[in-house]
Image: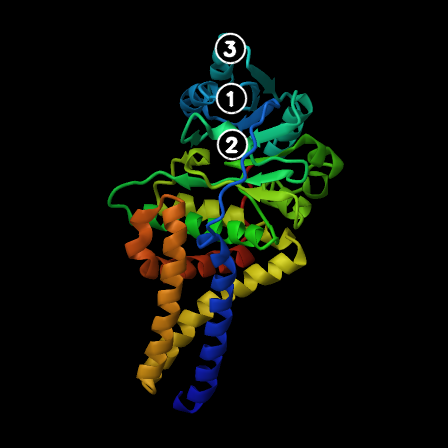
């Protein structure tokens, strides 16, 4: 093992340099001080929610949507063959408020089909999406997200975090993974290289959806109504980000490791359909993360040049902590800051396990 020390050491230097380069790239989001571009909008907004077996969540979400402080909007609720009282909950609210339109899928199933049908029924050009288990954090969610639209900006990326659960390591891991993902897609967008968005808080125009033929190119894949659509239609100039606190949404996280692990397997299962350059960039980032920790442990085990190796390790760790901490403050995840340097290698290990599992066992898809 000692004979391989020079090779491992030089590999460690290269991998550290590559990984720090990626963090420097996404740090444009963390350290950005530019103010959000806001334009007062008078145009109508269509808010779309596709739900399957979400009766309890809809009882919380729909009143929050109806309470939005925006002059002209509609709410399109899509029932995707629910087996509980989801449709009844929708109908109860609809009978009391004319803002609500219900689409009850009768033939085809699936979120992409439901969203497509909802968009075709939408009255307005600007479309805003969330999920049934997401709650807008203010009554200005619609106005904050849609204020980013312009003649050029046709896709708006928002932030959707997860609620905090006290004394839960799983909850910290979930929220940290969400934070790191947001750092990446916001950071790439800030560098005019957008690659994804999350359907829990996403907006785009009806014109763009129709022009791109919607989900046609990946209709055979059940996931991807959000990230694949953005990946295929985002350009250097047509994407804006919205990170004002009033634009955030928040969801209830998974409560056990198995449920979260299955969820992440599904989410990562479509990444190989991204544009080639994004597959390469994202793959290189995760590989550099994993190899950084693997090579560090290997070099420490050899027990040579420990001071130099530890110095390089600490320089990288301090850099990562600073960049991630700034993002955590922006995205209201300050509680995670003391745990960042522990959560990162832990999450990297889980992501590698997910990657290997997805290769060996095809993940089950959700509708």
Q: State which quarter of the image contains the N terminus.
A: bottom left
Q: Which residue is mark 1?
A: 70
Left or right? Give the position of 339 relative to 24.
left
Residue drawn where x is 65% and y is 60% of the image = 277
Q: Nearer the viewer, mark 1 or mark 3?
A: 1
Q: Earlier in the sequence, mark 3 or mark 2?
A: 3
Q: Of callouts 2 and 1, which one flags the residue occurring earlier in the amino acid sequence?
A: 1
Q: Is residue 265 visible?
A: yes
Asked if the residues shown at circle 2 and circle 1 are in contact, with their CB atoms under 8 angstroms apart, the answer is: no
Name the quarter where the C terminus is drawn. Answer: top right
Q: Is residue 301 left or right of residue 105?
A: left
How was the colour assigned to the protein in this rendering?
Answer: rainbow
Measured as percent of width and height from the top left, residue 265 is found at: 50, 49
Q: Is residue 363 depicted above or below 64 in this figure?
A: below
What kind of element bears circle 1? loop
Q: Position of residue 303 (x, y in %)?
A: 31, 85
Q: Earlier in the sequence, mark 1 or mark 3?
A: 1
149 relative to 217 in the view: left or right: left
In the image shown, does 109 or 336 lie closer to the viewer?
Answer: 336
Calculate the distance from the C-alpha at mark 2 to the C-alpha at mark 1.
17 Å
**Number of other residues with Cα within 10 Å of mark 3, as a class: few under 14, some 14 to 19, many 20 or more:** few
The residue mark sitting in front, 2 or 1, is 1
* Residue with the mark numbered 3: 97
Q: Label 3: state its secondary structure.
A: loop
Is label 1 in contact with label 3 (beta carbons under 8 Å)? no
Q: Which mark is residue 199?
A: none
Q: Where residue 252 appears, x then y in whole percent?
A: 38, 36
- Which residue occupies the foreground of this view, 241 or 285? 241
User: Is residue 30 depicted above or below 161 in this figure?
Assistant: below
Q: Is residue 353 above or below residue 15?
A: above
Q: Which mark, by number, is residue 130?
A: 2
Q: Position of residue 80 (x, y in %)?
A: 57, 26
């Amino acid at each position: 093992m000692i004979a391989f020390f020079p090779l491992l050491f030089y590999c460690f230097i290269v991998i550290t340099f590559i990984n720090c380069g990626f963090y420097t790239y996404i740090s444009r989001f963390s350290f950005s001080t530019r103010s959000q571009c806001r334009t007062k909008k008078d145009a109508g907004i269509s808010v779309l929610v596709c739900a399957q077996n979400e009766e309890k969540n809809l009882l919380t979400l729909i009143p929050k949507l109806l309470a939005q402080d925006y002059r002209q909007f509609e709410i399109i609720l899509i029932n995707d063959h629910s087996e509980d009282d989801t449709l009844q909950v929708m109908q109860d609210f609809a009978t009391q408020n004319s803002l609500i339109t219900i689409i009850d899928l009768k033939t085809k199933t699936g979120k992409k089909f439901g969203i497509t049908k909802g968009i075709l029924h939408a009255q307005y050009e600007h479309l805003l999406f969330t999920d049934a288990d997401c709650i807008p954090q203010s009554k200005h969610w619609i106005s904050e997200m849609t204020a980013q639209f312009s003649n050029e900006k046709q896709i708006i990326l928002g932030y959707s975090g997860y609620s905090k659960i006290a004394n839960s390591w799983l909850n910290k891991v979930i929220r940290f993974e969400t934070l790191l993902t947001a750092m990446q897609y916001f950071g790439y967008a800030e560098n005019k290289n957008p690659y994804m968005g999350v359907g829990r808080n996403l907006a785009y125009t009806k014109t763009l959806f129709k022009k791109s033929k919607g989900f046609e190119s990946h209709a055979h894949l059940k996931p991807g109504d959000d990230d694949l659509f953005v990946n295929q239609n985002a350009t250097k100039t047509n994407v804006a980000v919205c990170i004002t606190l009033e634009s955030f949404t928040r969801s209830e996280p998974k409560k056990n490791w198995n449920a979260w692990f299955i969820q992440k397997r599904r989410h990562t299962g479509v990444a190989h359909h991204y544009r080639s350059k994004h597959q390469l960039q994202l793959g290189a980032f995760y590989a550099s993360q994993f190899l950084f920790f693997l090579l560090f442990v290997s070099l420490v085990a050899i027990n040579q040049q420990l001071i130099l190796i530890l110095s390089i390790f600490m320089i990288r760790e301090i850099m990562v902590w600073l960049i991630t901490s700034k993002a955590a403050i922006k995205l209201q995840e300050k509680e995670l800051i003391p745990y960042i340097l522990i959560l990162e290698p832990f999450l990297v290990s889980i992501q590698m396990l997910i990657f290997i599992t997805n290769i060996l066992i095809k993940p089950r898809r959700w509708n």
